[in-house]
Image (spheres, rainbow, N blue to C red):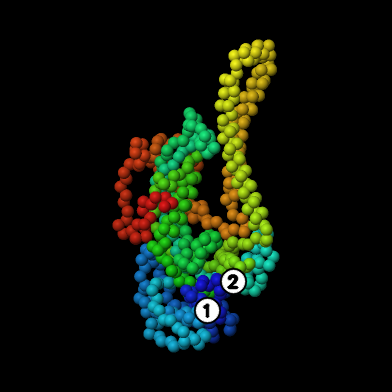
Amino acid sequence: MAIWDKPAKGGFGSSGTETFSANAVKCPNCGSNLIYDSIRGACICSNCGGLFDPSTLDKVGAFGFVNPEKDYDGTIEISEEDAKRVEIVCNSCGAQIVTDKNTASTFCAFCGSPALVTRRLTREFKPDYIIPFKFDKAKAISLFEEHCATVSHLPKNFRSKKILEKMTGLYVPTWIISTEVEVNVAGKGNKGKMVDDAYSNNHSSSGGNYQMLTFGKVKFRLKNVPFDGEIKIPNRLMAACEPFDYSELIKFRPEYLQGYFAEKYDEQPLDMTDRIYKRFDKYAFQVCEQITFGYDSFVPDTNASYTSYNNQNIKYALLPCWFLNVEFDGKSYQYIVNGQTGKVAGDFPYAKGWETIERTSRKAKINAISLNTGLRAGLYLLPALLLCSVRLFKFGDTFKWMKFVYNSPGEIIIVLVTMGLLTYFLAEILPKILHSKEKKDLESLSQASSHDIAEEQGAEAYFDTTFPVVAYETTQDFVSLEEGWKYGEEKQYDFLSAQPEAEEQSYDENATEFEKQGHGRRMMH
């Protein structure tokens, strides 16, 4: 059970959690244990009141090693230092102590139980970096309560002081990955009315309205995308509390762990290749959607586009989070508070009856969007319908109209101009207005309710603005340039096979297995 599900009794972590209080940094003045104070940003002695800068303290004991930065490749072998250690786990209270492999114990030093299991460490767990907690438990509870006040129709008896006191501070093991992205993108370039799906689905191409199979190349860089390495923590929950400010990432020192729990990682990057590259693909798709290649719109096709990820950098760090598990009305709700920024995330329950009301409202909006689409399809057909109605006039009727035109030319001109303007408005202007409204309605529907967990961060949160972006079309001469983008040289594609000309791929011979997994991937697969 994870630490936020049921906080450990007596200050020790549940299964899979490390606590460092049993091997704590000692006060240089009186020898008592020190605890890291997130408010003061220093280690404090509860006995003599001494304050000490963590960076000036030398750790005493089994956790006294500060890791040099490593080039993680997903195949990390346990270090010699860690190979000499074992984990002694108490099956009774859940306490865990990492100690020397020659140390013997017949009972738990914390609860006296003889139910001990000794196991060797199988993975290296000390991080390269850490972001220390910026605020304490009281502040975390206050931030959670402030967030609850913004959630409409929340049950009045949802939270209590007894429940909020279970909030637990935990350092989450996280792999922070930066990578260069290269996309051979294919899709449809739309001109004119073809940008409107209601038109493209019901009408064929014309001179000013057409779709074109388009190929292009896009290059950019993603910076500091986090992936938690702890299986028991829901990925969706961790993603909801992003982003972190990595300018405050500092070299790891165990002093920052005093008074907090810390998990060991269960997964290395190589264990998470599918999850990692799918998220990168999602960001690649979002960037490609922002590039029009000179058309009125460009829609990437994930089945025909390929991504490659190169020159990767991986950091292993501990990120601060406050976790809370709330049991309410027979259901379990999990919450997270970013221990650096204070962002609160999680799914919140509705007061009785309000969830049904909100669902009904959303359904009504969806029906309105469908009606909007059908109306636009009819409006686009309006000129053709008018033309057909004119052709249905009988000859005798036509003769009468000609006589009327001869006798009243001024009135006829006014009627024709009015009808022409009205037809133009209905067939050209109004569909665009309705299409714009539909896009806004779809965006509002896609936005999460205050009751829903926050969405995963988009590409803009991890886009490396210092890396020169290259984007260019490769199917034909480029038409126009978008402000802010730098375009590279063109390369032609074979239109008969709709495949790019062969390119020599030159990958680093020393690429890790994790990096090789990111070469030549079909987007979103």
Residue 275 lies, with reference to residue 496, above or below; the image says below
Residue 42 shows in the view? no
Q: Is residue 98 left or right of residue 512?
A: right
Q: Quadrant of residue 41?
A: bottom right
Disc 2 element: loop
Q: Quadrant of residue 141?
A: bottom right
Look at label 1 and name its amino acid. Phe
Q: Quadrant of residue 268?
A: bottom left
x, y percentage for residue 444?
60, 49
**Which residue is at the front of the view, 157 or 359?**
359
Residue 198 shows in the view? yes
Q: Residue at x 32, y 49 (%)?
A: 505
Question: Would you call the spot at circle 1 few (<14 residues within 10 Å), some (14-19), or many (20 or more)?
Answer: many
Disc 1 element: loop
Q: Which is more N-terminal, label 2 or label 1?
A: 1
x, y percentage for residue 487?
43, 42
Query: Alpha carbon of mark 1 to alpha carbon of mark 2: how far?
Result: 14 Å
Determine which residue is flagged by label 2.
Answer: 167
**Which residue is at the front of the view, 350 or 394?**
394
Q: Residue at x 51, y 76 (%)?
A: 14
x, y percentage for residue 225?
47, 59
Question: Would you call the spot at circle 2 few (<14 residues within 10 Å), some (14-19), or many (20 or more)?
Answer: many
Determine which residue is flagged by label 1.
Answer: 12
x, y percentage for residue 273?
40, 59
**Which residue is at the front of the view, 45 or 21?**
21
Look at label 2 and name its amino acid. Met
Q: How many marks?
A: 2
